[in-house]
Image (tube, rainbow, N blue to C red):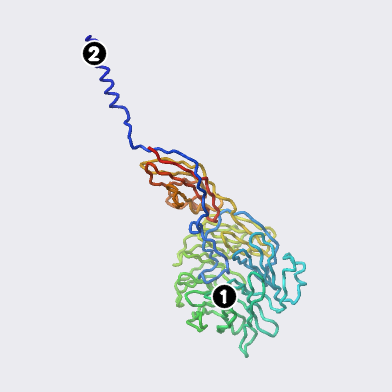
Amino acid sequence: MRRIGIIALFAVAFFLLGCATQKPTHQGEMGLESFVSQKKPEKIPKEFLPSKVPWKMRKSNAESDMFYTSSLPRKPEVVFSVNISAIMADWLANAIVEGDKIFLADHTGVYVLRKDDGTLVWGAEIFFDDLHSRENSPLQPITKWRALGLYRLVSAYGVGKHLFVGTTNSVENDAYLLAFDKDSGELVWKVKLESEANASSRSAVTSNLIVAEGKVYVGSVRDEGYVFCVDENGNFIWRSKVGATVRGLAYGDGALFVTSDPSKKLYALDAKTGKVIWVFEHDDMLTAPSYRNGKIILSDSQRNLLALSKDGKPIWKKSLGVSGDVWGDPYIALSDKSIYAVGLRTLFTLDFDGNLVGNFTLESNERGGKPLVSRDIIILPVEKDGGGKIYLLWRGGVKLSEFEFQNVDWMPVVSAAYGEIYIATPNLLYKLADTEKPKIGSVETKLINESLVVNLRAYDGESALYKVLLVYSLNNSPWNYKEMEIARRYVMEPIGGYGLMEEEYTATIKAHSGLTVEFYIVAIDNSGNYEVSKVYAYRISK
């Protein structure tokens, strides 16, 4: 009996020890139970997508020069190339893109292509009074053309309320400013840009064209050097004389900044009245100006880069060997934070205080042209032996990709719109874009400390990721949006941006027993492409 008692005592002791070491069970512990959702993803609200903006002219009332105010793909593909006619005297046309249309010009006319496939919408032959010169043109069918017979050549163009075109003069008469209906190609109005009675020559548009605050501005030729202002309805507003051939116009803060050739002066004109506000006189001839952040940026005939205040006071000068074209347009581009200036074989990046913050060096047989800058990508056109090319650079210093164009004897001209890139050569227009959707990996869901945690891996190898969204519904509520966070941040943003390579993203939702959670994932790239996952559905249970 004593032995039985001892055994019973040991049994009780082992039982108590087991109770002391066993993991306790919590009555409130929650679990996940999946079910099949009946909810469908909805259309993504615009505010969650990257902005897609048009390209109305290389200088505009956005107070910028060659600045695309959104993002561009890092590694795009050629969507199409179409035969065009793009030579305007001694320079190439710049593709203007608005809505579903591409606006282009050659020496004697303007025309419109469809943005999706490059087919002709309409054309206007401005110089000749018949269409014989267009019969063998690649821009067909000829039935979509009309002839105006104004015997003026195309000098400048831009888009606002209409497609506006500035012309040269005729043998004995002045230039015209024309307005075409953008959809039909009908001539809406034409205004003669008349010289003074005793002028040394007839007016002819020689500057870029600017549309700002409902007004159209162009500069004119020779000794008088007029600047003309016409409103978008075709009403003549003012004419101002600055002397010498006007080469460049820039607009900002209610003023028009004007340089002329061979003058050494920069004029500031009141944009409403045309009256001279101030005149800055330099030691050397000045190139076409640009305006941004309260500063006028331009170069001189010694290839220095200059910055002036908006009241005409010199701020700084840098000897960078800045290049430019034969019409005095320097190879510079201005973003909201930086100045990009191209020397013979170097792209320089400066801040607006004139500090050099980066550079990119070309190959020995390459010569850089006028760059285009976006929020994060810089496109640098290049002329080289046997052809042309463009570089796509990450914020001015690191090459992400490049494209070569064979048998191109001219510097390519670049524009950007709606997250796409357009390159004009004398006979071909290329459209480059990212057409690929982002990639979403497996989605993991777990409960941690009364929160539903969603993890996934995603990337976009063409444009990098703009946002990854968790779109969720609680107890069948309307869809809610929450931006997912990148699980690991770096000291410096990766080259090309976050999500160009695969990254982990995470988000949490507060959970409690009895809650139903339905969600899906939207991954959006910087070109506006997006991928939507399936809908996941869970009940939170005890």
Label 1: few (<14), some (14–19) or many (≥20) C-alpha neighbours in 10 Å: many
Inspect the image, locate mark 2, and give the three-letter code of the amino acid beneath it.
Answer: Ile
Q: How many marks?
A: 2
Kindly indicate the quadrant of the structure image that contains residue 117: bottom right
In this rendering, position of residue 382 left or right of residue 349: right
Residue 517 percent coordinates (x, y): 44, 45
CA gap, disc 2 and disc 1: 108 Å
Q: Nearer the viewer, mark 2 or mark 1?
A: 2
Q: Quadrant of the N terminus?
A: top left
The earlier-in-sequence mark between 2 and 1 is 2
Please give the residue where the numbered disc 2 appears in the rendered image.
6
Residue 444 percent coordinates (x, y): 46, 41
Inspect the image, locate mark 1, and give the three-letter code of the amino acid beneath it.
Answer: Gly
In this rendering, position of residue 303 left or right of residue 540: right
Q: Secondary structure at mark 2?
A: helix
Q: Secondary structure at mark 1?
A: strand
| Residue drawn at (40%, 47%) of the image | 509
Q: Work out whether residue 71 or residue 114 is closer to the camera in this orientation and state it.
A: 114
In the picture as drawn, the residue positioned furthest to the top comes out as 1
Please give the residue where the numbered disc 1 appears in the rendered image.
248
Relative to 21, say whether 86 is above or below: below
Kindly indicate the quadrant of the structure image that contains residue 171: bottom right
**Badges 2 and 1: C-beta atoms under 8 Å apart?**
no
Q: Is residue 358 in sight in this rendering? A: yes
